[in-house]
Amino acid sequence: MIGLFAAFILFVALHSVPAIPAIRTRIIGRVGRPAYLAGYSTVSTALLVWLFYEALNTDYIELWATAAWQVSVTFILAPLGLFFVIAGLISPNPFSVSLRQDGHSQGAIVNITRHPVLWGFVFWAAGHVLPNGDLRSLILFGGFAVFAVGGLAMTERRARTKFRAEWPAIAKGSSVVPFLAISRRQQPFRIDGPMLVGAIGAALISLWLLYGGHAALVGADPLATLHSLP
């Protein structure tokens, strides 16, 4: 359990660096942006692998019995989370995490929420808490969900600071909570290329995970688990 906590603390600490402009700017100034991105990605991936290794090798302590409906929740939330992450990363988004920062340009996913990538991690992580029902999964996936929710507040505050006087105009019609602006008719629902890519990518990854990928990665077969439960 100590190894799991240590890996998670280091993972959170590393992913707090981009949220601290002074530290990030200093590192980029010394090594350059390409080296920073390459190094950050490498270390982040290594920590993620270590984190899951520690989780899989931590003693199983059951907290609640798993039921079929809990696994069904995962079948909804996990693909939804993948969709939000993929579509969010490849869509223009001036407010939040994205691979495309094209001025004030906003992809269709931003009509749903200003922070699709972070919400994607919330959905994915929360969807994995219920069907596992053990302490290590609660620490791992519950910790991911809490960290992502904290990132929502931090990223929203940073975006408001970034745009200052422009904020009311540029953020009009969007919302932090998914679908809130659309439900209030502040923004129409629309679909663009990145959203289609996100939907197709999430569907393909989900099918791969369901039919062998998940079992190969972590040793658990979601469909077999669902069929074995009352």
Image: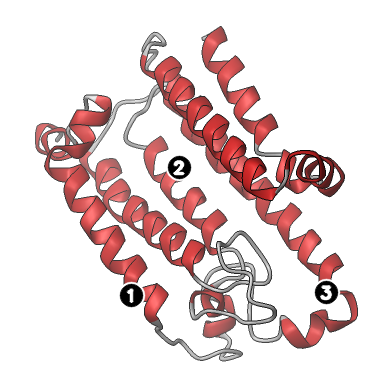
Q: Position of residue 209 (x, y in %)?
A: 21, 43
Q: Label 3 is placed on what type of residue?
A: Phe
Q: Label 2 belongs to which residue? A: 125
> What secondary structure is marked by label 2?
helix
Q: Label 1 is placed on what type of residue?
A: Leu
Disc 2 versus disc 1: nearer the observer: 1
Instruction: Kindly check if marks 2 and 1 are in contact, taking CB atoms under 8 A apart as contact.
Output: no
Q: Label 3 belongs to which residue? A: 163
Query: Mark 2 or mark 1, which has the lower sequence index?
Result: 2
Give the Cα separation between the discs numbered 1 and 3.
29 Å
| Figure quadrant of residue 86 | bottom left
Q: Is residue 127 above or below residue 82?
A: above
Residue occupying image coordinates x 52% and y 79%: 107
Q: Is residue 155 above or below residue 220?
A: below
Q: Position of residue 220 (x, y in %)?
A: 21, 28
| Figure quadrant of residue 215 | top left
Give the Cα separation between the discs numbered 2 and 1.
23 Å
Position of 165 with respect to 39 (left or right) is right
Q: Position of residue 114 (x, y in %)?
A: 62, 70
Q: Is residue 78 above or below residue 189?
A: above
Q: Label 1 belongs to which residue? A: 196
Q: Position of residue 52 (x, y in %)?
A: 42, 24
Give the Cα separation between the discs numbered 3 and 2.
30 Å
Please state which of residues 129 and 196 is positioned toward the viewer in this rendering.
Answer: 196
Q: Local crowd at mark 3 within 10 Å, few (<14), some, or many (≥20)? A: some
Query: Mark 1 or mark 3, which has the lower sequence index?
Result: 3
| Figure quadrant of residue 204 | bottom left
Query: Mark 3 or mark 2, which has the lower sequence index?
Result: 2
> What secondary structure is marked by label 1?
helix
Instruction: Kindly check if marks 3 and 2 are in contact, taking CB atoms under 8 A apart as contact.
Output: no
